[in-house]
Image (tube, rainbow, N blue to C red):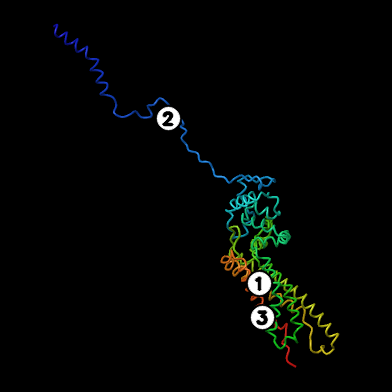
Amino acid sequence: MASSSTSLSGVSAQSPVHHHLRLRLRLPRHAPRLSALPFSRSLSIPLRLRIPRLHLPPLPFAISHGGGGDNDDDDNNSGGGGDGGGGDGGDGDAPDNRREALFVLAQMGRKLESLPSDLAAAVEGGRVTGEIVRRFAEMEGSALLRWLLQFQGFRERLLADDLFLAKLAMECGVGVIAKTAAEYEKRRENFVKEIDIVIADVVMAIVADFMLVYLPAPTVSLQPPLATNAGHIAKFFHNCPDNAFQIGMAGRSYSLLQRLGAILRNGAKLFTVGTSASLIGTGVTNALIKARKAVDKELDDVVEDIPVLSTSVAYGVYMAVSSNLRYQILAGVIEQRMLEPLLHNHKVLLSALCFAVRTGNTFLGSLLWVDYARWVGVQKVQEEA
């Protein structure tokens, strides 16, 4: 009994140790799940990485004080009235163009109000790039260009082509010489007999040469959008380029129909210019003929007055068709798309080639006019006596 009680007491004495070993053996092999943790599962843990938006440097000088300059939401409302264009592209680039142009202004330390109103509106609407704004500032350094930039027509053309003024001088300068040489080439022995007709042609050329360069020249469009109640025809021609073949400025593109509309619109303008120029030219020529007849009575049967109305209409048609197409191709294809990209950094060589091409085009136009005028019957070949 004693031994059994001793053994039992020994067992009882060792049982806590044995119980402790059993507890350790029964510990779970896997860590408890998160659901067993004493805190709520919905507890927020600030592990989210926030990446700040990229912004251009501040524009303290360029922003207009008129309000609305800092609101990025307004950038999406660019171009209004573009539904009638049917081919205008690049509207999504308007916010980028606006930021770029404002950034260029800030770099120059200028405010938006320092620009002409139409150019400032184009900057706000994202219709011009920073390069155009920079070109405007550079041109203001010249007294002559600064004066011409006051006129919207010259401003749109000078910003699109920095050689526009040089081309205009080329055309008007060589016009008289080239057209006189072409008249002599066609008339030869009858040149002196038909000198009155030659004078009429040269006078018409002087009046028309300016518009032949001015109207088909590529432009940066600074015109504001038309009113919402404008007609469909007005909207269509408003969205047409000035040159049918010009490169779209500021990411803008033109549809084929819009480019055909440019030919039609310029043709109508050149018809008016050609008819008006011919009225002036034939009027001056008839006045000279009458003065010669008053001095030399023998000229009454030799020299005839030029038909004013028929000659003017014929010249207007010639300008609308032949001159319109030739000068549009010259300015939009040969000069802007071919010569300018190749010789962009060689302005002297580029000007020389433009001079040669325009001189040849003027001479060709004079030859075509003589043939056309004789074909429609407004000019007759003087027979040898």
The answer for how far apart the CA atoms under marks 3 and 1 are is 16 Å
Spot occupied by residue 366 in the image (x, y as percentages of width and height) = 68, 79
Q: Amino acid at mark 3?
A: Leu
Image quarter in which the C terminus is found: bottom right
Quarter of the image for residue 255 reads bottom right
Spot occupied by residue 129 in the image (x, y as percentages of width and height) = 61, 55
Can you name the residue that lies furthest to the right here?
Answer: 294
Q: Work out whether 107 lies above or below 87.
A: above
Q: Secondary structure at mark 3?
A: helix
- Apparent side of residue 102 relative to residue 313 in the rendered image (left or right): left
Q: Amino acid at mark 2?
A: Arg
Residue labelled with disc 3: 367
Q: Secondary structure at mark 1?
A: helix
Q: Secondary structure at mark 2?
A: loop
The answer for how far apart the CA atoms under marks 2 and 3 are is 92 Å
Q: Residues within 10 Å of mark 2 (few under 14, many from 20)?
A: few
Q: Earlier in the sequence, mark 2 or mark 3?
A: 2
Quarter of the image for residue 156 reads bottom right
Residue labelled with disc 1: 324
Residue labelled with disc 2: 41
Of residue 280 and residue 339, the one placed in the foreground of this image is 339
